[in-house]
Image (cartoon, grey):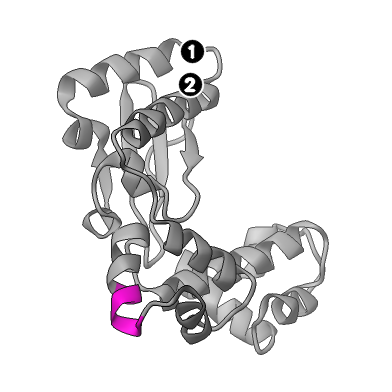
Amino acid sequence: MDLLWTPGRLFVAGPDTRAQLPQGGPGDRFAGIRFAPGTAPAVLGVPAYELRDRRVELADLWGAARARRLTERVDAAADPVAALESVALETAERRAADGVRPDPLLTRVVRLLDGGAPVAAAADEVGLGARTLHRRAQAAFGYGPKTLARVLRLQRALALVGRGAPYASAAVSAGYADQAHFTREMRALSGMTPSGYGAGGAPA
């Protein structure tokens, strides 16, 4: 989930279960920050599933007056990304003082799944049944733990490609059966192929 800025506008990109076309046109300026998995609902004040596959104006979540003040603040900043980080951190600290924090068990689930653990093993490790884990994952991530595991696996593979690993070895190291599996999953989740994403980076 992302908090995004373009001049005169702040909005949130919810958790995506399919590829989304970028907004804006040539020459438009954008900046954004990405929340760690499971942390955005505590900051934004809404369950993640309410924002799934959506782009939502910050005014709809925090009210028009506050959103306008924050938009003007980011508009005037020399570094919009730093300004967005400041907005998110200030809000997180204020909500934490009110007792609103990310679900600690789901933070552990993220670490386990990102390490390649199966969903059932992660659920057992944190002491949650399958239905309870799914319900809490919907609120924290916007989708179930199996979809989260797919997203994290794709991120692991792309990180390896970004460091220069060949696609085939990156696929296997990240937990895919083979390069074709990696390609299918990337197309399903991002609308791109690994080669298109790499734009001539790592060798096939």
Residue that label 2 marks? 83
In percent of width and height, residue 68 lies at: 25, 18
Q: Which residues are magenta?
A: 129-134
Tell me: 90 left or right of 176.
left
Residue 167 position by quadrant: bottom right
At 41% from the left and 74% from the top, the residue drawn is: 145
Q: Nearer the viewer, residue 49 or 168?
A: 49
Q: Which secondary structure class fits the magenta region best?
A: helix
The amino acid marked with disc number 1 is Ala
Q: Is residue 28 visible?
A: no
Occupied quadrant, residue 66? top left
Q: Earlier in the sequence, mark 2 or mark 1?
A: 1
Residue at mark 1: 77
| Quarter of the figure with residue 159 | bottom right
Describe the element under mark 1 as helix, strand or loop: loop
Residue lying farthest to the bottom in this orientation: 177
Front-most of residues 89 and 193: 89
